[in-house]
Amino acid sequence: MRTGIFGGSFNPIHSGHIAIGEYFHRSGILDEVWFVVSPQNPLKTSEVSLNAEERLQACREVLKDYPYLTVSDIEFELPRPSYMAQTLKSLQERYPDRQFSLIIGGDNLAHFERWKDYRQILDNYDILVYPRPGSPNIVPENWKRVRLFEDATLMDISSTQIREQQKLAREQQAN
């Protein structure tokens, strides 16, 4: 089974995340997409509006009607901070019959070399890149297992924008 691993804080999960999962499933590239909720992304500050358990539950609630989009809590079982190379290795050990691919956005592609053990990921997994507005969306020529899906619809939505809008709304209510 071809399974995409879409890791993130999902703080909060939103329609853009769902659209990315649906894109890779409906295009026939993947049989299913697993949303791997990260308790703490090592490359992000801990500015959080929802704690890890709340984010996990929110993902489960939002994705419950999508049989091909599943939520994984594997990073809750792994040492923290969690690193995608270890997550993928653990998943491959648990599910040896699955063909895993990593799904990332163009924003993550821009700093992928900062990821711990990124070469291990490049050498062992296909990486499916969904473009992001404002990101360079450029794949280095020697990264043979990385595919940028330039035909995908660009979505101008992010969890950061949602958190900022929520903060502004709270501030306006307080005044």
Image: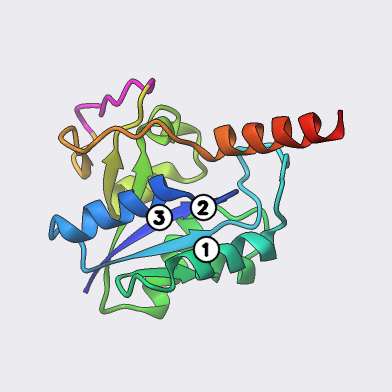
Q: Mark 2: which amino acid?
A: Ile
Residue at mark 3: 6
Q: Which residue sits at x=50%, y=33%?
A: 114
Residue 153: x and y in percent read: 23, 36
Local crowd size for mark 3, using a 10 Å CA cut-off: few (<14), some (14–19), many (≥20): many
Which x, y percent locates residue 17? 41, 49
Find the magenta span and give its range: 134-142
Q: CA distance from mark 3 to mark 1?
A: 12 Å
Q: Main secondary structure of the magenta part?
A: loop
Tell me which corner region of the image, top left, top right, bottom left or bottom right, holds residue 16.
Answer: top left
Is residue 26 visible from the viewing direction of this image? yes
Q: Is 42 located above or below residue 106 in the figure?
A: below
Q: Nearer the viewer, mark 3 or mark 1?
A: 1
Mark with earlier residue (2, 1): 2
Left or right: where does residue 31 sit relative to residue 114?
A: left
What residue would you read off at disc 1? 59
Name the amino acid, label 3.
Phe
Which mark's residue is nearer the viewer, 3 or 2? 2
